[in-house]
Amino acid sequence: MQTKHVITLMLCISILFGCTKEHPKETIIENQSQQKKVSNKQIANHLSDVAQSVPGVNEALVTIIGSYAIVGIDVESQLDSSRVGTIKYSVTEALRKDPHGKTAVVIADPDITTRIQQMNNNMREGDPMQAIIDEVSSIVGRTMPLFPKKEPTVHERQEKEMTPSEEQDLRNIQKKHSHENE
């Protein structure tokens, strides 16, 4: 009777381990297909397709720099700025859902879109990477919003002012240092 139990136990274990061995192979194959190397050009083409799928986008030009993408979109010139903003937001949302588009900067300015096209041409022609990075910095610097400097509140200003005793201590320190330098 013990032999039957041992054989049954061995059979169950072999079936259990036999079934689980196949799953890691499938996972590895799935992971390998997901980890397939993709070139920047392929990513740019893909992100361009995603952006162009948004209604209102005529054309999308994409430049990839490292893990970031700059997406210039071309929309109808007669659209008002609120409609352009809505399209730009829709493109940004569509790109954020894509693993390659999470860090994309979307620009709807025609002049900057032209500059993006020129950068793509320059990269194809083999321009130095530093020149392209400088151009990207310039574009991002022009498109990032500027926020006014926060004015300190009355309470914050009062905290920065010295008390009369602190002023006296400062005068004493200054006198001491001025006498040491004579």
Image: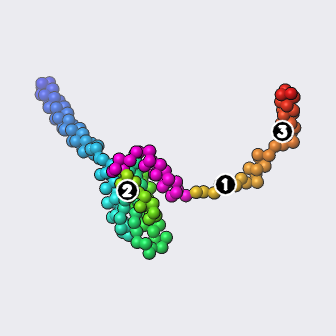
Quarter containing the N terminus: top left
Q: In this view of the protein, which residue sits in the foreground, 30 or 108? A: 108
Q: Amino acid at mark 2?
A: Val
Quarter containing the C terminus: top right
**Dot 1: within a 10 Å radius of its alpha carbon, few (fewer than 14), some, or many (20 or more) residues?**
few
Which residue, given by chain and number where applicable, does mark 2 sit on? 62
Residue 166, which numbered label?
A: 3
Is 141 covered by the magenta stretch?
yes
Q: Residue at x 16, y 32 (%)?
A: 14
Q: Secondary structure at mark 2?
A: strand
Which residue, given by chain and number where applicable, does mark 1 sit on? 150
Q: Amino acid at mark 1?
A: Lys
Q: Nearer the viewer, mark 2 or mark 1?
A: 2
Residue 35: percent from left, percent from top: 29, 43
Q: CA distance from mark 2 to mark 1?
A: 35 Å
Q: Please report contact status of discs 2 and 3: CB closer than 8 Å, yes or no.
A: no
Is 85 covered by the magenta stretch?
no
Q: CA distance from mark 2 to mark 3?
A: 58 Å
Residue 9: percent from left, percent from top: 17, 30
Residue 16: percent from left, percent from top: 19, 35
Q: Quadrant of residue 50?
A: bottom left
Q: Residue at x 45, y 60 (%)?
A: 112
- Is 41 placed above or below 51 here? above
- Marks 2 and 3, the one that precedes in the sequence: 2
